[in-house]
Amino acid sequence: MTEKIRLVDDNGIRTDGRKLDELRPIKLEAGVLSNADGSAYIEQGKNKILAAVYGPREVHPRHLALPDRALLRCRYHMAPFSVQERKSPAPSRREIELSKVIREALEPAIFLERFPRTAIDLFIEVLQADGGTRVAGITVASLALADAGIPMRDIVAACAAGKADGYILLDLNDLEDKEGEADVPVAYMPSLNRVGLLQMDGQLTPEEFEKAFNLAIEGCKKIYALQKQALKAKYLAIKEAVEETGQK
Amino acid sequence: MSVFYENRDIVTPGDLLAEGEFEAGRNTYKIDSKIYACKLGLVEYKGKTVQVVALNTFYVPSVGDMVIGKIIEINLHGWIVDINSPYLAMLRPTEALNKSYKPQKDELSGFLDVGDLIQAKIIAYDRTRNPLLTIKEPGLGKITRGQIVKVSPAKIPRIIGRKGSMINMLKRETRCNIVVGQNGLIHICGRNSEDERIAVLAIKKIELEAHTSGLTDRITEMIRKERRSE
């Protein structure tokens, strides 16, 4: 590359017009699939991700069943058309790793010990990717789990922060992720004040890391409010419709 | 001692419901003196207990429950039954047949075959072993006619209503015999298909509007309207 792309201009505005500590516009919806026990859909900027939950149900193959708790199985998968260049539909090394970290971010939130010898299957399908799909995947997956009626300690909200052009930014998009200096994805349970996922890709000083981490936590709290709203939306709409016809 | 919501507010997992000397009821959990919700539902404060009535849930077996299940497998020890729960149930020949069963010569599929629907009662269950069923009580056994409706097990108390008010009204207004399985499967058996169709419609409406008030009256009205339009 001959000239470096400017990710933040002199006024502190990013390539997509956001401020430094601004999230991308988020649309969340719960209960979108009728055949799954629980499901959810998220649009975060250009990211479009669908999550489906099945279970708790019998474990197949049976030898995988755990005697003292439920088995959480997670598949993060990117559709071949989700990125610029066609991606092979076979699970890549990256997808297998992300499936594992997403599972580990969600496990502490679920009362797995209440349903021994069963499996909860979670499918996260990225339909369109634009950076930060692992955190958006966690956000939408925990919404699908709550929609399925699986008992949870808290809803998990996830958000990334990072560094580009020397600025600490919230919720990096694909360009900022690739051209920027660092990326810090965080999954967080706001009511319990617990962190379920913390990664860092790139280089940050300890001060910068702390700043990015705190910024990501703030982002998680905003996303958490949206998640709660999305869960309630379906039921509040019916309640309102019923009350309206009652008044007539 | 403080509460953070009104009765029947919708809460989500992780919401702090109450703090102080409260007891954690259904669908809640306690850390120190704080009580949190663990499911999406309606919060209820009843004296010292705090509970959440879940809006969606799956069926967890409980001894004594009447359930409707489907035979999915037959082996030498009995029938494996899908009861719409995380665990598959077992129906042993001693709990189904009136004569003694000899695995060497008796064929179980002659009595109940794969795909058959049964009304059964849970006689044993704990988390370490799968539930056991019986059909040796009056009213239980193979379902031969009628229709099955599946609803979320969370809505079953609403379909029955307080002291059976909703279900009695349904039976009276639709002129159908309705059996409600605790696992979310409902068996409707009417004199004609029109009666059954109205019963199915009514149950679907209850499921959708379970968390609203004044439901029994609205359902009665709906059924009468459907009747008139026949």
Image (cartoon, coloured by chain):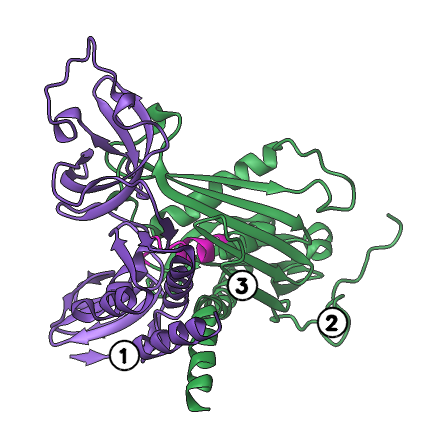
Chain colours: A green, B purple
- Disc 1 target residue: B4
Q: Chain of mark 3?
A: A
- Disc 3 target residue: A29
Expressed as whole percent of the image width and height from the top left, the position of residue A47 reads 65, 56
Type of amino acid under label 2: Gly
- Disc 2 target residue: A17
Residue A149 in magenta stretch: yes
* Dot in front, 2 or 3: 3
* Dot in front, 2 or 1: 1
State the extent of the magenta-drawn residues as a range.
Answer: A141-153
Q: Is residue A188 left or right of residue B119?
A: right
Type of amino acid under label 1: Phe
**Which of pointers 2 and 3 lies earlier in the amino acid sequence?**
2
Q: Is residue A83 left or right of residue B142?
A: right
Expressed as whole percent of the image width and height from the top left, the position of residue A6 reads 79, 62
Report if the CB atoms under discs 3 and 1 are less than 8 Å apart: no
Residue A218 in magenta stretch: no
Type of amino acid under label 3: Glu
Which residue appears farthest toward the bottom when viewing the image? A248
Q: Chain of mark 1?
A: B
Q: Residue at x 40, y 54 (%)?
A: A148
Mark 3 closeness class: few <14, some 14–19, many ≥20 residues within 10 Å: many
Q: CA distance from mark 3 to mark 1?
A: 26 Å
Q: Is residue A151 visible?
A: no
Mark 2 closeness class: few <14, some 14–19, many ≥20 residues within 10 Å: few
